[in-house]
Amino acid sequence: MSAAVRRLAWLGTALVLAAIPPLFGPYYTNLFLTFAIFSVFSVSLNLLLGYTGLFSFGHAMFFGTGAYATALALKHVSGLPLLAAFGIGVLAAALLALALSPIVVRVSGTAFAMLHLAFSQMMYVLALKLHGITGGEDGIGNFPIPPLTIAGVGAIPMKDEPANFYYFAITLLAASLWLMWFFTRTPLGQVQLAIRENPTRTDYLGFKVSQTKAVIYVFAAANAVVAGSLYGLFHNLVSADGALGALVSFAPIINIMIGGIGSFLGPVLGTAIFQLIEELASRYTEHVELVIGLLLVVVIMYAPMGALGVAKQLRQKWRRQSPPTGALQKSP
Amino acid sequence: MNILETKGLAHDFGGLQVLCGVDLQVRQGERHAIIGPNGAGKTTLFNVITGTYRPSAGKVYFKGHDVTGLAAHRLSRLGVGRSFQITSTFGRLTAFQNIRLAVLARRGIRFSALRTIDAMDDVTRETDAVLARINLGAERDRAANALSYGKHRALEISLALASDQELVLLDEFAAGMSRDETHDAVELIRRLTEGRTVVLIEHDMDAVFSLADRITVLHRGEILATGTPAEVRADAAVKEAYLGEMEF
């Protein structure tokens, strides 16, 4: 793809994203924003799962910590700018990840997965029990959402303005997605793959495996919070079940499995499929989880590399069947 | 001068004494083979030297510095590399990506996340040059574990040498290779390790005698003899230990 085509593609994507609120109305705008939030959340988990080979059952812990931190900051500090509250959320979860990293970089595989299940359940229980701070089962609702003030433009109201909030959120989500994509293409992103493939060899090459894992871990956590913090603002409600529950940890795992673990955009595709099925299934049955669960079983048994894996296989099959086209054919 | 030295190195696995007081001396610039029957403690010796295991007694010195039990990445930065008995590369990454990681390590690019790697033209050029030198140019975009056994081994050896290591430990590089592949590997090692010090564990005696300047014979965790191939061949103790076990 030439630079000009790529620039056009970016421009096209930006235009489509900008056109969603006026063209589709608030219901579909909100649906799309939910999709975007969970896409970023899933991609941030995939940085650990797909790129570093670290399987976490507790990614919600960062999602939720950020959501709570942002909500608490807005509730208790009057006059706090919106971006500052958002930044506090990101900082809180990054600090949590940093604090946990000395422990979690020393384990991998099942131990890593179970340790995260334990930590995230601990956060979940804390959110329920520390009633005075977190509001217990009710969570923190209807906290003030200040307008976004941009120098030279003025204050843009955010509370009960779905279109404005959509533009605000989608910008931050896009930035987060771009940052993660860029990260995978840097030297550190290559070291990340090396750790997934062979930590011992990485060590013998002279890379500090534990420290590198810690950097990736904090980075993934910070991007999970971008999603979590915006999720709290979006609903103007943060609750233990909605932001820290086990299902919040499992959702991105399911998205990654459905979409395809082997690529950057797989989890985004998975999120889209997940939401589509959830949306459609909920019109016919209350047991949406059952439908999703069955789909997951089918994916794991018949398409372990997810939808993108199937697409890749089909493409290869089609290529083998099509007659050779001379110069265009790559030698095997 | 001795680039690598061990003094009274001992190691036991829960009471089983695998190394009992090994005094190994490797001279700067030589190719030093360690031979001995299975279970003599050769690989354990490598693992203790490279810090995988802590010795129960004794010390390891690299260029006169005590490096006993040092972590692998620190040892690597000092200039010690190693290959493994079971080929150890980045399996699902391409040959190019494998070598590029070594190039990054050598240049000390370890935590860089501000530029894309494709924008680093000098890294790409150097990687392609290394690939050409080890005859892997045509396999550039193949996954490492899809390479033929010999080529996969060659890739691993170049990873072990990647950061201009002064000392490299090769653990049975010829294991499982055909005669032709062994011959090619010997040539490759000779070419790639020029000016460096090599310690190799090897069962293939043709490879040992065509590569090694000196040989140490390990038997039941102890050094039986050290010397030139001719001296070792003539050693009475070695003959006795090996009688009926190995043909020289």
Image: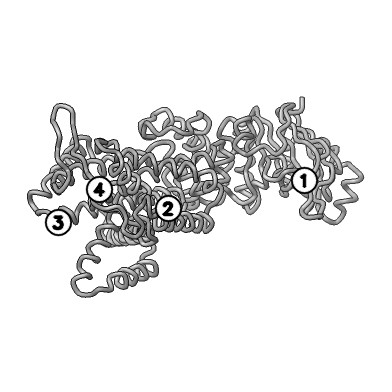
Point out the residue furthest to the front here: A132
Residue at the image position 30 percent from the left and 52 percent from the top: A140
**What is the chain identity of the residue bearing mark 3?**
A
In the picture, the disc for residue B35 is 1
Circle 4 or circle 1, nearest the eye:
4
Circle 2 or circle 4, nearest the eye:
4
Circle 2 or circle 3, nearest the eye:
3
**What is the chain identity of the residue bearing mark 1?**
B
Q: Position of residue A297 (x, y in %)?
A: 37, 70
Residue at the image position 68 percent from the left and 31 percent from the top: B197
**Which quarter of the figure is the N terminus of chain A placed in?**
top left
Q: Element under label 2?
A: helix
How packed is label 4: few (under 14 Cα within 10 Å), some, or many (20 or more)?
some
Marks 3/1 same chain:
no
Question: Is mark 2 in CB contact (under 8 Å) with mark 1?
Answer: no
Q: Is residue A152 above or below residue A282?
A: above
In the picture, the disc for residue A143 is 4
Q: Tell me the amino acid under the disc marked 4.
A: Phe
Distance, label 3 to label 1, CA atoms, is 72 Å
Marks 2/3 same chain:
yes
Q: Element under label 4?
A: loop
Q: Tell me the amino acid under the disc marked 1.
A: Ile
The residue indicated by pointer 3 is: A28
Q: Tell me the amino acid under the disc marked 2.
A: Leu
In the picture, the disc for residue A49 is 2
**What is the chain identity of the residue bearing mark 4?**
A
Q: Is residue B232 above or below residue A45?
A: above
Quadrant of the image occupied by residue A301: bottom left
